[in-house]
């Protein structure tokens, strides 16, 4: 069935980026997102990609084509290709639902940027905390 997800990026006690989305099969669709700190939305987007990849999701619908999405590696596809990928992904099950513990951003990105939490711009959110849950949650 359909599951709704809240993806949040925290920097210490401050919520700095997040999005709402839903999954069906091994397809994930982003519905709406926000950011409060420069570059935090991009970090949240990359962290979301890592979570989806690690959990066996095969298709991510990012919505409208926007320059920042293309800069992060997204690509536009034709409507027919979109529908073909979406139909196939909806029929497949992911490895598991991405309902996971809170994770530090560097822990998610270490194999992407090769950082130790101090050497990369992507890891400037060393204090940031990323977590994904299928229900509202409270930090603490």
Image (cartoon, helix red, strand yellow):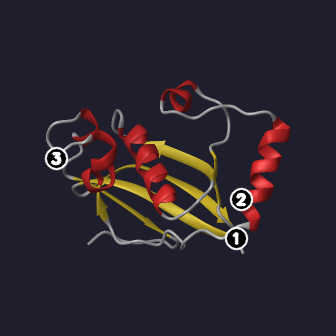
What mark, if any, has residue 2 been given in the picture?
Answer: 1
- Residue 87 is situated, as x and y percent measured from the top left of the image, at 80, 57
| Separation of residues labelled 1 and 2 (CA atoms) | 13 Å
Q: Position of residue 108 (x, y in %)?
A: 33, 54
Left or right: residue 97 compared with residue 132: right
The C terminus sits in image quarter: bottom left
Question: Badge 1: few (under 14), some or many (20 or more) residues near its Cα, within 10 Å?
Answer: few
Q: Earlier in the sequence, mark 3 or mark 1?
A: 1
Q: Position of residue 131 (x, y in %)?
A: 38, 63
Foreground tag (1 vs 2): 2
Residue 44 versus residue 20 in the image, above or below: above
Q: Which residue is mark 2?
A: 89
Q: What's the distance in space between the residues labelled 3 and 1, CA to CA?
A: 36 Å
Identify whether 21 is placed above or below 75. Answer: below
Whichever of callouts 3 and 2 sits on the residue coming sooner in the sequence is 2
Label 3 close to label 2 by CB (< 8 Å): no
Res 125 → quadrant: top left
Residue drawn at point x = 62 percent, y = 55 percent: 58
Between 81 and 14, which is closer to the camera in this rendering? 81
Neighbour class for label 3 at 10 Å: few (<14), some, many (≥20)? some
Q: Secondary structure at mark 2?
A: helix
State the residue at coordinates (24%, 42%): 114
């Amino acid at each position: 069935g359909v599951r709704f997800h809240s993806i949040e990026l925290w920097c210490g006690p401050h919520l700095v980026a997040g999005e709402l989305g839903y999954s069906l099969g091994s397809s994930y669709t982003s519905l709406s997102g926000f950011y409060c700190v420069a570059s935090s939305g991009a970090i949240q987007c990359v962290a979301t990609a890592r979570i989806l990849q690690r959990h066996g999701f095969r298709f991510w619908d990012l919505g409208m084509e926007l320059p920042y999405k293309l800069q992060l590696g997204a690509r536009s596809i034709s409507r027919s290709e979109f529908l073909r990928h979406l139909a196939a992904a909806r029929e497949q099950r992911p490895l598991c639902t991405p309902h996971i513990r809170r994770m530090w951003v560097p822990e998610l990105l270490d194999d992407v940027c090769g950082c130790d939490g101090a050497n990369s711009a992507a890891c400037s959110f060393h204090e940031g905390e990323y977590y994904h849950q299928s229900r509202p949650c409270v930090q603490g």
